[in-house]
Amino acid sequence: EQNLRNTLQMINRRFNDLAHWDNVTGDRYQVELEIVSAHLEIAGTGYSFPAIEILKTVIFDTQTQQRIDGIVGNSFSSYVRDYDFSVWLLAHNKNQPSFSVPERFGD
């Protein structure tokens, strides 16, 4: 859950960086994510499993209080991996004498 919160913070910062023309303080927009799971059922068994998880995005404009539907289809795991490698791994190894991987990295 903490990893998801950190990932959302990273996404919000990046989105606000890209939408800078009407966003002087860099915090006007928030990206809301809903995880959509597609389950695959094996015929006749009653057994199903999640085959894929994708994201449904909504952009929330804190200035106008408007929600703007985004796209559906971003890979959830790619956002988590981006945070893991771009933020968490770098922070863990900052000023360390040798490279290491943080505990629970990739969970």
Image (cartoon, rainbow, N blue to C red):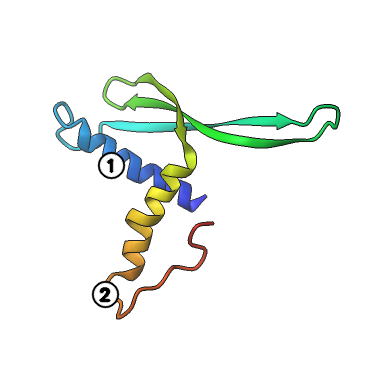
Callout 1: few (<14), some (14-19), or many (20+) C-alpha neighbours within 10 Å? some
Q: Which of 89 and 67 is in front in this view?
A: 89
Do we see residue 29 in this rendering?
yes
Q: Which of 28 and 41 is in front in this view?
A: 41
Give the residue type at disc 2.
Asn
> Residue 74: which quarter of the image?
top left
Question: For the residue marked with disc 1, what is the amino acid?
Answer: Arg
Residue 62 at x, y = what percent? 30, 27
Q: How far apart are marks 2 and 1 (CA)?
A: 24 Å
The mark that comes first in sequence, 2 or 1, is 1
Q: Name the residue under label 1.
A: 13
- Labelled disc at residue 95: 2
Element carrying mark 2 = loop
Q: Tell me the quarter of the image containing the C terminus.
A: bottom right
Taking the spot 36% from the left edge, 26% from the top edge, the residue there is 59
Would residue 17 appear left or right of 65 to someone viewing this image? Answer: left
Residue drawn at x 40%, y 42% is 8
Q: Is residue 6 visible?
A: no
Residue 32 shown left or right of residue 18 in the figure: right
Callout count: 2
From the top left corner, tell me how far across and down residue 7 is, in percent: 40, 46
Residue 25 higher or lower than 71, as above or below? below
Q: Do the residues labelled 2 and 1 touch (CB within 8 Å)?
A: no
- Residue 41, image x, y percentages: 75, 30
Task: Specify the quadrant of the image occupied by residue 53.
Answer: top right
Q: Is residue 92 above or below residue 10?
A: below
Farthest-out residue, right: 44
Residue for point 14% across, 34% down = 24
Of residue 44 and residue 80, the one placed in the foreground of this image is 44
Q: Callout 2: few (<14), some (14-19), or many (20+) C-alpha neighbours within 10 Å?
A: few
Q: Could you tell me which secondary element the residue under label 1 belongs to? A: helix
